[in-house]
Amino acid sequence: MKLRPATQSDADQIYMIAQTAFQRDLLPKELLDHHLSADRVHYLINEQQTAFLSYTKFFDEAELDLIAVQPGMQGQGLGQAVLEEWLSELGPCRILLEVAENNIRARNLYLKFGFSAYHERKNYYPDGQTAILMEKKQ
């Protein structure tokens, strides 16, 4: 799996993937455009433009913000391949993320890659779901 840094020309595709994968406006287009031009939040996209990952990194700590796969491509190991490639390129650091309690597929993926839960935020999401905070040291 090859990932490349996303550019402004990828914005429409990333926005479409996010809208269809999350089925809500989790990533407003204006925010995405700002992220792609400001170099604080990093976006990586696969060559086929069917999956992306976004993260922030501060010194020896990284936060996985979003990972999304185009709905027609889900369940084929693409999210796993994107995560695996990112982790292999990231280098030594502490990695943090949050995931909805009911997102079993994502939680299992993170557990498979060595993430562990360290805290919960009850009623964190608009639908009342609990956020599970996870970390991995590599």
Image (cartoon, helix red, strand yellow):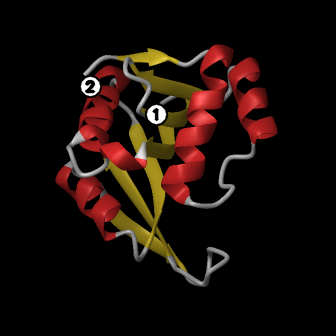
What x and y, as percent, mark residue 73? 32, 43
Q: Are marks 2 and 1 in contact (CB under 8 Å)?
A: no
Label 2: which secondary element: helix
Residue at image coords 49%, 52%: 21
Number of labels in the image equals 2
Return the mark for residue 18: none
Looking at the image, residue 121 sits to the left or right of residue 8; the answer is left
Residue at image coords 69%, 23%: 36
Return the mark for residue 52: 1
Please tell me which of labels 2 and 1 falls first in the chain: 1
Quadrant of residue 91 within the rendered picture: top left
What x and y, as percent, mark residue 101? 42, 75
Mark 1 Cα within 10 Å, few/some/many (few <14, many 20+)?
many
Residue at image coords 37%, 22%: 48
| Quarter of the image where the N terminus is located | top left
2 vs 1, front mark? 1
| Quarter of the image where the C terminus is located | top left
Instruction: Give the alpha-carbon distance from disc 2 to disc 1, as whole Å.
Output: 16 Å
- Residue hosting label 2: 88
Mark 2 Cα within 10 Å, few/some/many (few <14, many 20+)?
few
Up the image or down, 109 lies above or below 133; here it is above
Which of the pair 99/4 is nearer the observer? 4
Label 1: which secondary element: strand
Amino acid on which the number 2 mark rests in the picture = Ser
What x and y, as percent, mark residue 8? 68, 17
Up the image or down, 26 lies above or below 80; here it is below
Amino acid on which the number 1 mark rests in the picture = Phe
Q: Is residue 138 visible?
A: no
What x and y, as percent, mark residue 117? 35, 66
